[in-house]
Image (cartoon, rainbow, N blue to C red):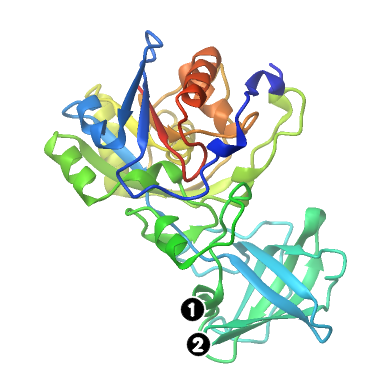
Amino acid sequence: MRVDEFDFDLPSELIAQQAAPRGESRLLVVDRPTGKLSAAAIRDLPSFLRRGDLLVTNDTRVFPARLLGRRVPSGGAVECLLLSNLHPPASTLHPPPSDLQPPPSDLSPSTSETWLALMHPGQKLKPGARVLFEGAGATIVGEVLDRHFHGRRTIRLSVERGSVADAIDAIGHIPLPPYIHRPDTTEDRDRYQTVFARHRGSVAAPTAGLHFDAPLLAAIDAAGVERVSITLHVGYGTFKPVRAELVTEHVVDPEPYEIAPMAAEAIDAARRDRRRVIAVGTTTTRTLEDAARKGAGRIRAGRAEADIFMYPGHEFLVVGGLMTNFHLPKSSLLMLVAAFAGRERVLAAYREAVQMRYRFYSYGDAMLIL
């Protein structure tokens, strides 16, 4: 199967640059057995669900991973996107990559952290280069420790007082997707975050969850739909382009996840009772399907990394329904959706969405596939 079989035409004006208020987006409903399409609104979601359905959401929290600063002493501008903490606290979900072990630091963990980061301009930021990030009453000093491929660096971040995490939260910028062509704003700190967000660690939002607000969740609960959350920290690999010609040649980046015992029990109970498990987002779908394979068919509580790549031909073990935003042409996320609903059916739905002027991508409208 060729990657270009997942291409489609999208007018640039349909790429949402601002988010609609929560609960006010449009919803395109796809009936898998028949291919029938129904135009609806997010507020209509409870009417498409059944009593006893299990709705699974991702409760990861986006942190302001984009740091803007300057080189010392030259003053040249530097941009740093934090990808993963190489020495995280035990409570986080980021295991350090085995091939990126940083040198030991003589600073305390609260005042120094070592990260894998994507930095620009890459050629000038060699090991030993120092950078300064400051603003809003916080200052972070960075030292490049090592160089890696595609502009990635190992960087040590240090603060004189307080914690590095607090300093990042104070001066960092929300890492909006590259197709949103504007600077982030204070409003994005709230809007590019789901109402489920609990566990800090993502550099991109699980965007299907951005549509929910308290009244919609109350209506879902009143309809007799059960809800649980899992945690998958979304990495920068979610924007990784598929450069291969054949789908099977592409490799997705692994992402860490955790499933709590209560959630694992609820998911397995729904499967035993033959109730539908409906995933909110592709990140939730990856977590559930990856966990089922690693658990020999069962959802086991605990931590792991989702390294599963789903494309047409994939057999779904857990997910019986999917709510998702509209994805980029030729992307691994579009291939996942096509694996669930069929390539031709999904592309037909996308063509209909374009004709009906639905809004696309992270801040856009949603699709429900049942």
The reply to whether discs 1 and 2 touch (Cβ–Cβ < 8 Å) is yes
Could you say where residue 177 lies in the image, as x and y percent from the top left? 58, 50
Q: What residue sits 47% from the left and 45% below the top?
A: 363
**Residue pointed to by mark 1:** 166
- Badge 2 amino acid: Gly
Q: Secondary structure at mark 1?
A: helix
Q: Is residue 23 left or right of residue 103?
A: left
Viewer-side residue, 310 vs 125: 125
Identity, as a three-letter code, of the amino acid under mark 1: Asp
Tell me the residue at 67%/42% (across/down): 240
Local crowd at mark 2 within 10 Å, few (<14), some, or many (≥20)?
few
307 vs 183: above or below: above
For the residue pair 40 and 222, the one nearer the viewer reads as 40
Which residue is more in the foreground, 48 or 305?
Answer: 48
Count of picture labels: 2
Q: Looking at the picture, how far across and down is residue 295, in whole percent?
A: 44, 35
> On the rendered image, what quadrant is the N terminus found in?
top right
Give the quarter of the figure containing the C terminus.
top left
The residue carrying mark 2 is 162
- Classify residue 10 as left or right of residue 367: right
On screen, residue 53 versus residue 286, left or right, reads left
